[in-house]
Amino acid sequence: MKVLIVGAGAVGFTLAEHLSEEGHDIVLVDQDTERASFAQDQLDIMTIGGNGASLAVLEQAGIDKVDLIAAVSNVDEVNLIACMSAAQFGVPVKVARISNPEYFTEAARLESAKQGVDLMINPELECARETYQLLQSEAASELAFFAGGRVQLMGLRVQPEAPIIGRSLAEVAASVKDRRFLTAAIAREGQTIIPGGDDIFQADDLAYIIGESKQMPLVLEMAGYPEFRLRRVMLGGGGRTAVYLAEILEDHGVDVTIIESDRSRCVKLAEKLKKALILHGNATDMELLEMEGVEEIDGFVVFTGSDDTNMLASLLAKSHGVPKVVALINRIDYIPLVSRVGIDAAVSPRLSAVNSILRFVRRGVVVGVAALRGIEAEVIEFSVRAGSDLAGQTLAAIGFPDDSLVGAITRGARVLVPSGDFALAAGDKVTVLAMPDAVKAVEKLFQ
Amino acid sequence: MSARTALHIIGLIVAAVGVAMAVSGVVALVYSGSDALPLFASAVIAVLFGVAANRLTARPKDLTIRESYLIVTLAWVSAAVFGALPFWFAGVASPLDAFFESISGFTTTGASIFPDPGSLPRGILFWRSMSQWLGGMGIIVLVVAVLPFLGVGGMQLFRAEVPGPTPERLQPRIRQTASILWRVYVGFTAAQAVLYMFGSMDWYDAVTHAFATMPTGGFSTRTASIGAFTPYIQYVTIIFMYLAGVNFSLHYRALRGRPQSMLADEEWRFYTLLLSIAIAIVLVAHLISGTYGTLEAAFRATAFQVVSIGTTTGFATADYVAWPAVTQGVLFFLMFVGGMAGSTGGGMKTMRLWAALKQGVVELRKHLHPRAVVVTRVGGKAVNEGVMLNILAFMLLFVASFIVGSLMLNALGVDLVTAAGASAAAIGNIGPGLAGVGPVENYAWIPGPGKVILSLLMLMGRLEIYTVLVLFHREFWRR
């Protein structure tokens, strides 16, 4: 597939990286020639320096032969115009990154009018939604949902006093009646392993569990986490992402406190948010945090513009015993570091946006996809087509690549945990965890 | 600022008052009363003065803010002065009493110096009710609605007269907005008169009482007020007094097919809740003391008096001065609340009270969280600090004016309860107060200077205090 990406910022670059690795042909357009040439050096793609909203530049990029355009620059208007132009050239699939909520509803109208955009991605909104999911459980450092929410992937750190420590995967599996989850990967001391039955759980393992969502509370209990209910959340930084998250939390009856350092922004927040308490101050101001009862809150989320502040504020909150701390990290390469220093989870609007676009691009046999942050792996949900060779074959016979693992199979209303002699049927939804080099081979199996 | 500019517009208003007096004169002729001559004489004087003042001055190109305030205040005083002439000419009142009666009419207060209105000639009574009707929606709003030339200056005049913190524009042009408000007002008045006539009132009583209800005025042609009529008439009056206290913009929306906008309005819910609570308290007091024989009678008397005082109308079907003590306390505090912003009701307006209460809660929150940035929200919208300070300062000035008024009346030898009741009833544009100025008493016995003080309070209440008080600011007169 030929893909045109407008904007070589973090979203565009990461998207180009993933799609290129999957074998798509990428043309990347960015006004900043330096950024464009940097991308060309790093990735096996073609880059063009120029305005992505200009027809001349788009023609130069060969827009008439493009199968998909992803306009992901950080300027909404450029993205919208690029998609509208692409529509005139008959590009079949158009994806735009739109951050301004006013355009978001406006564009929904455009969408329905079949004028321009097939998919709107709002990175801040996606990130807020993801953060809300993460806040739902104390343990999860990563969460992704498949099969309409019935299947879940959860990354969690095994607590030192967890009952499963020192026991093998097979022992643990045998101890659960009617088990519908499995351990798909373990990150230990910077290395990722796809575990077998005789691997043994150790304290501080970062375990990735795939299974039925209903059984996740049991998983949490075994990993050493007490019951958790989200009642009060404190947000550091009152940007767009924070507003989205605050709105979601308010809707779910969670008390929200926002700390914002800019006074006029505080007033805007107070006008916008009906229930949230808005404080004027710094997210790293210990005195303020203590005065506002940081010890009693259930979750602390830092969304300021600076990674440094976010890390520092998160560590402060963690040192005050906040059960769940989530930080926004813009530098994607910092993200694996975060869980190692004790912050529960990291999110990034850019990565959220990339995930959403990847999910959309791969739709077809691929139903869902999530790129993990703690480890270099992807979780992909495939559907078994009617008439596919796979139907009727056992997993062992199909021969999945070594660096991949089938986590769960959704058949009708049931979620099944596979073993080697499990036979697939048409219509099954198969959730697979794969390391980067195995992704293509797994995808090939399902084509 | 030129006196000529002011005279031009004031002339128009005085002439309009003259025409209204002539209409009352016609009513007097119909009943062949002796009051036709005084009414026509007053009408001629007013029209002559008005036309002369208007013709001899140039039409203002635009109005400065100071001119607007001066014009509005002077217009109301002039209307009251010329409107007082019939009472004086007919020989039923001294000049001061006539002025008091007239300004009480125009400001929709309904405080009277007549011990026995039933004995007055019919043309004079008709004029009394009509002055309230003119004052209710506002004589300036009427002028703005009719005259096209007051485009931009019109908004300033409009703002200076319309009750409530921030008048709402229903249409792009101020003239259209003013004319919508008047049409709604006329429509309700007509509907009420028709409903009255179904209840066997004659056209004269129906029209005069409808004239006194929609502006929340309270002048009656009977000495016993609405108490002289059947329970049906009393219920109709309760409903229309209640409606008069509702924001006319809401009426307009409801009539345009969006009645849900009323239910969604926070202030409306507060206004209705407040009246309901007051009715509940007073009703329980009656049931405990057994003032009334039947539940229906107790409820009717309670609802009537509460709605009448709460909307600042001032009609009566019972002498609440003789009621249990707690009921008088409830009614006294209701005097300060008044109707909704944008209604014809007086008082501080429920909007201001509601906003102030919310601000109070916000202040509590700020005490708990010293670093919190909190905005006060009324009807889902944030109220900016300037508007909030305006509201709080208004309430302070309102209460301060009430206190100063009470003390001055007290100093003139009026007992404290009567003085407080009269002062509250005047600044709230209600009419009947407490004790010596209760619903079955009148204001004739108040000393002369007291009547002047009360007249000023009525004017301040009707023009929302600021419009009158700015005239007393030093900078107002600075060139």
Image (spheres, rainbow, N blue to C red):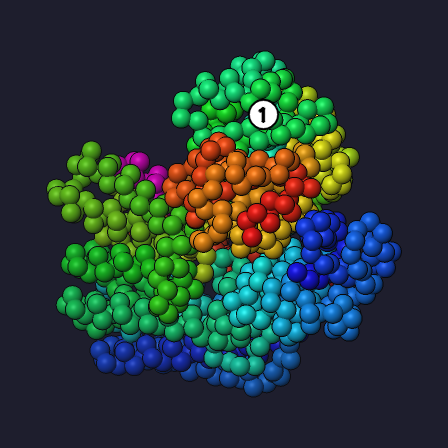
Residue at image x 24%, y 41%?
B283
Residue at image x 50%, y 76%?
B175
- Farthest left residue in view: B293
Quadrant including the N terminus of chain A: bottom right
User: Mark 1: which amino acid?
Assistant: Gly
Residue at image x 29%, y 56%?
B315
- Farthest right residue in view: A34
Percent from the top left, x then y, of residue B216? 36, 60
Residue B144 within the segment the image draws in magenta: no
The residue at which mark 1 appears reads as: A196
Classified by dominant secondary structure, the portion drawn in magenta counts as: helix
Horizontal arrangement in the rendering, residue B439 relative to residue A198 (left or right)? left
Percent from the top left, x then y, of residue B121? 26, 70
Q: For the magenta stretch, what is the residue range?
A: B323-335
Percent from the top left, x then y, of residue B411? 48, 42
Numbered disc total: 1
Residue at image x 68%, y 50%?
A22
Visible in this render: residue A23? yes
Residue B334 within the segment the image draws in magenta: yes
Determine whether A222 is above or below B400 in the image.
above
